[in-house]
Image (cartoon, rainbow, N blue to C red):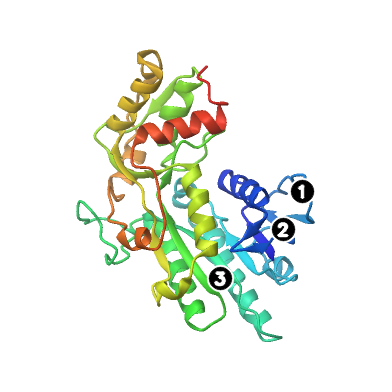
Amino acid sequence: MKILVIGAAGMVGRKLTAALLKAGQVAGRDISALVLADIVSPEAPKAAIPIETYAVDLSTPAAAEKLIAGRPDLIFHLAAIVSGEAEADFEKGYRINLDGTRHLLEAIRLASRHGAYAPRLVSTSSIAVFGEPLPAEIPDEFPLTPLTSYGTQKAIGELLLADYSRRGFVDGVGIRLPTIVVRPGKPNKAASGFFSGIIREPLAGVEAVLPVDTSVRHWFASPRAAVSFLLHAAEMDTSGLGQRRSLTMPGLAATVGDEIEALRRIAGEKAVKLIRHEPDPVIAGIVAGWPQAFSAKRAESLGFVAESRFDDIIRAHIEDELGGQLG
């Protein structure tokens, strides 16, 4: 099986690559080759199979054709710019998040003209496809109502994935990721970045800024869970999806206050005191329109699983990023 990972240099992409190499197979088929692509060249880990890396902008002409030239059997499309950046730069958001997706789908469709080719395409979407007015718990049947450019771009991508799957060009699975915490490394431009920052920085003994009220409630899953979602989407029987190719992933509904209390239980008051409340009306305004909780019964019935306690999300970060030890 040949696999292509687009967005492989990102946090989830790197963890996915490591998981694929560790497993050595997907759905009982051995992985024979791996292609890793991103806007910057991903690092090629040591492996017993051939690994190619590409620095490529998917939104540029012919980039997608180059990436699928080897006819990968499985494609993970993770590439995107994040919510805050897409809102700040309208043109860049649509070019990367929408045009890049369209170019990839079109390259696959045109390749199918020259022989039977319909790869499994696992594409990441976002709960930002939903916006107010919202029920307290959003059901699987709720319509797409984005209130940001990022959410709109992701919603259009979901519709394209469904249509190209309906026509048989791809076997698509769209997964709407919860906000992924705790993200390792440096903060990015996502409006949701503080959800990770108020845990990650105090655990490292560094001050963190909280731009919203502690009553803000949101939908979370760990990087571990995100990788498990992707792998399960790659292996699942898609006949149960029907024409509705995108799924809201399971997660944990928690407030910022719940996050802080979990941090207190695990790392103590010293860590909590490193959180400084500094209101930011722009971020607060963006977050105010985001969903707070979901009933992800459809995904759960298809075998997707996430954490049920925020303590478990923090412990996963400590184990995976801090060697299992607090500083």
Q: Residues within 10 Å of mark 1 (few under 14, many from 20)?
A: few
In space, the residues marked 2 and 1 are separated at their CA atoms by: 10 Å
Q: How many marks?
A: 3
Residue at 51 percent of width and 21 percent of height: 204
In the rendered image, is residue 89 in sight?
A: no
Which residue corresponds to mark 2? Answer: 34
Image height check: is 300 above or below 314?
below
In space, the residues marked 1 and 3 are separated at their CA atoms by: 32 Å
Residues at badges 1 and 3 in contact (C-beta under 8 Å)? no
Mark toward the start of the polypeptide (1 vs 3): 1
Q: Looking at the rendering, which quadrant does residue 154 occupy?
A: bottom left
Image height check: is 270 above or below 296?
above
Which part of the image, by quadrant, shows the N terminus? bottom right
Q: Amino acid at mark 2?
A: Leu
Numbered disc 3: secondary structure: helix
Q: Judge depth for marks 2 and 1 and give the one in front.
A: 1
Residues at badges 2 and 1 in contact (C-beta under 8 Å)? yes
Residue at 56 percent of width and 59 percent of height: 96
Mark toward the start of the polypeptide (2 vs 1): 2
Question: Looking at the picture, how far across and down is residue 206, in whole percent?
Answer: 49, 19
Q: Residues within 10 Å of mark 3 (few under 14, many from 20)?
A: many
User: Left or right of 26: which side holds 49?
Assistant: right
Report the disc number at residue 102.
3
